[in-house]
Amino acid sequence: MSPPEVVEIRGPQDVVAVRQLVRARALELKFSLVNQTKVVTAASELARNALVHGGGGQALLESLETGTRRGLRLTFTDQGPGIADIARAMTDGFTTGGGLGLGLSGAKRLCDEFSITSSPGEGTATVITKWG
Amino acid sequence: MSVERIPILKMGSILLVSIQVDMHDQLALQLQDDLTARIASTGARGVLLDISSLEIVDSFIGRMLSNIAGMSRVLDAETVVVGMRPAVAITLVELGLSLPGIRTAVNVEKGIELLTGRLPSA
Amino acid sequence: MPPEVTLPQIISANERAILDDWLRLQQEAAGGRRGLIKDETLKSQSAEFLSLLAGAMTGGDRSAAWAPLNEFLTELSRARAVLGFSSSETATFIFSLKQPLFQALRKSHTDPAKLADDIWATTQVLDRLGLQTTESFITTREQMINRQQQEMMELSTPVVQLWAGILALPLIGTLDSARTQVVMENLLQRIVDTGSAIAILDITGVPTVDTLVAQHLLKTVAAARLMGADCIISGIRPQIAQTIVHLGVELGSVTTKATLADAFAVALSRLNLSIEQRAR
């Protein structure tokens, strides 16, 4: 099991890097193919959010093992402008970036655990956990 | 500045694009531009997008596919997306992306049949 | 004062006697299970356990010293679980060792206090090991059950090819989210494998269709469509049709038919195929 690692998200190539690292971990944890795809897709959404809305940030990748379960916990942080109304941001179709507005709510649906903390001027931290 | 681009092949009046790499956003946008330009310059009537190598399709790529379909339609060309992987389809549905307005086919052969009008659409 | 006689030494010195007694007790306790494990296998398992135990005790408290013994026991529990032993029967392997070991201890000690100490130490070790076998046993059984459940789910969602390009999926039983996942994966893979453009989802065997079930069905339809296959839902009983309307479920552009036969006819015509009666 790989140790925790932090990935800087400063440009579009870093979003790809996050996808590849998350996939490598999911493979190592022997996730089913569908779960691999789901967690990598969720990671891609959140990494892009950190880049596009947060002006750049970091991703913390942690492989988890508790008794019988193996999982992946990903924490995306940025020091951007923050989200004023989280509930609104989590509704499907809501977007401030001209996208499809599915990043946050979509990532939540794809994962088993999801939490987000953010406020204007304080940046955003999103944590997702996916069990294999 | 990256020089790599996704190649676009011409087969009669159909343009074939096979996406083989894990695209970063810039590359996807470049493809959108290149395709639109090629459709206009060649007068192509169909675009076949082969995504059988894509291991994930997130909302950005989904939007790119929709954009390509939309832009081609304006230029009087049909787009068909082929080869989506099962895990990707399941994830897209969970993500809430149904990609309306994009025609799909299960493989390149069926996609070409669709474009050349030999089969009813999916 | 004579030098301390350690547990490992006592075990080694009395190995023969301990083994014989232990084997006899195991076989007495085995009862109906006797035939499942060959006598030679039991003998070699017991001998190996004893020597691993002596080795571990020599190593003291370091966990590395106990690793080989723990691995051996995990494997033994797993093997017994697969053979159909109960967890107590498996733990008996350890617990029946107590009596012969205590005999050996009684023979080797003259000091009652030291004897009591060693009996207590041995009891602690064997109890812990016995509980360990129970835990491994339970884990193995749970893994077996999970695997069987998975197999059952896969078996109960067969995908049938009715004709080139037309697949049928007769759904039997409740459609919960776990089952839907399996159904989707099966169906989508078959769509790829066969290059089919039409999939008929027959829900005759699905007892109730509520909003959740409808959602699961629609998800499956959406996923198939993304892959280039159109779905037709068949087997809609009148009551189900009523429920769907009452719940306000939006079927959108999905074609629905009362019977699989009707759906097959639609599929054929979509592919520009027809069945004709030959003139005699």
Image: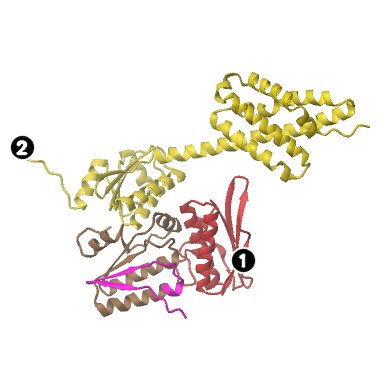
Chain colours: A red, B brown, C yellow
| Residue C120 pos. (x, y %) | 81, 30
Q: Would residue A78 be visible to someone looking at this image? A: yes
| Residue A115 pos. (x, y %) | 59, 59
Q: Secondary structure at mark 2?
A: loop
As shown in the figure, which amino acid type bears the numbered disc 1?
Val
The quadrant in which residue B115 appears is bottom left
For mark 2, name the chain.
C
Q: CA distance from mark 1 to mark 2?
A: 77 Å
Q: Residues within 10 Å of mark 2 (few under 14, many from 20)?
A: few
| Residue A89 pos. (x, y %) | 52, 65
Q: Nearer the viewer, residue C239 or C227?
A: C227
Determine if the magenta segment contains residue C125: no
Horizontal side of C241 relative to C143 (left or right) equals left
Q: Nearer the viewer, residue A27 or C49?
A: C49
- Identified at 33% across, 69% down, the residue is B17
- Identified at 42% across, 45% down, the residue is C182
Q: Which residues are drawn in magenta?
A: B1-27
- Identified at 26% across, 41% down, the residue is C260
From the image, tell me which residue sits under label 2. C280
In this view, A35 is above or below A98:
above
From the image, tell me which residue sits under label 1. A6
- Identified at 32% across, 79% down, the residue is B37
Q: Would residue A105 be visible to someone looking at this image? A: no
Q: Nearer the viewer, residue C48 or B30?
A: C48
Horizontal side of A20 relative to C58 (left or right) equals left
In this view, A118 is above or below A1:
below
Query: Are discs 1 and 2 located on one and the same chain?
Result: no
